[in-house]
Amino acid sequence: MKSMKDKVVLITGAGSGLGRNHAIYLAQQGANVIIQDINEEGANGTSRKLHKFGHTHRLMICDIRKTKQFQNLFEDIEKSFGSVDVLVNNAGISSQQRAIEEITDEILSEMFDVNIKGAYVATRLVIPGMKAKKFGRIINTASIFGMAGTDSGSHYCGAKAALIGLTKAWAKELAPWNILVNAVAPGFIPTPMTNRPGKEKIRSERKRSIPLGHEGEPADISHAVAYFASDASKYVTGQVLSPNGGIVI
């Protein structure tokens, strides 16, 4: 069933990992996808996947933190593609395991610039079009670490917790225009960002901590995103859905 037929969907960080999976899955549901990423090679890789199946899409190669650059590209695409119906704030960076003393001002700023400022930049631009038609879906990508924390990487936990706070605040602010704002908080999902060399021991230990006994798949998160993007969630806003195998309940 083409539940997203002709909807215009902007996915930030869609050049790899979960963002790429979201782009493919929502396109298969009938969406017209805008692929944003700072990595041109990655964005083109996602584009080739969508070309293969004949899905309509556009590319935005830019740094999510650079407001003017993002705005100029967005306005050009919006003129020809139409206003955005669904925004998936997926762009983000993770962290190495770091003690508080190791988190410099530069490291802290980068974490919040990408994960939080990036969400603001994209959201501010799509809101006017959503308000004009009194319809919109905004989906933020949080994390189980924003819900429960961890003993290393407090800057990452803080950024993801902040996204959950934004989700709840924006949901209340934008409800009068029928703009629904929700978040997904993935558990342990193998992606290029989490599958880096040297993390094998950490992944093995994490698997043992998951009540269901295994990691999830990118599709588990894309299904959650598709639910929030679709009419099936028309009475749901300000919520966090966390496919995590039971590790955070």
Image: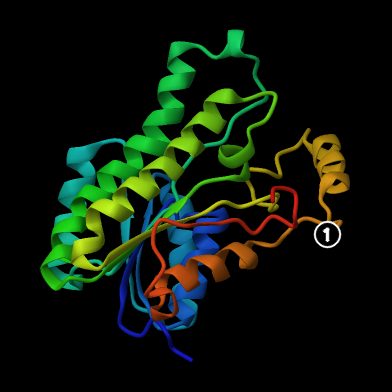
Colouring chosen for the image of the structure: rainbow
- Residue 160 visible in the shown view: yes
Q: Is residue 211 above or below residue 131?
A: above
Counting from the top left corner in percent of width and height, residue 153 is at 62, 25
77 with respect to 186 (left or right): left
51 with respect to 98 (left or right): left
Q: Is residue 78 above or below residue 111?
A: below
Q: Is residue 155 above or below residue 166?
A: above
Please state the total of marks drawn on the protein image. Answer: 1
The answer to which quarter of the image holds residue 228 is bottom left
Q: Give the residue displayed 47% in from the left and 33% down from the top.
A: 159
Q: Give the residue displayed 19% in from the left and 63% down from the top.
A: 176
Seen from the viewer's position, the closer of residues 83 and 146 is 146
35 with respect to 16 (left or right): left
SS of the residue at dot 1?
Answer: loop
Which residue is label 1 attached to? 212
Q: Give the residue displayed 67% in from the left and 43% down from the top.
A: 194
Counting from the top left corner in percent of width and height, residue 213 is at 86, 56
Q: Is residue 213 above or below residue 223?
A: above
Residue sitting at the far top: 101
Crowding around mark 1 (Cα neighbors within 10 Å: few <14, some 14 to 19, many 20+) is: few
Residue type of the residue flagged with mark 1: Leu
Q: Give the residue displayed 46% in from the left and 29% down from the top.
A: 111
Seen from the viewer's position, the closer of residues 182 and 68 is 182
- Residue 64 visible in the shown view: no
Seen from the viewer's position, the closer of residues 22 and 36 is 22
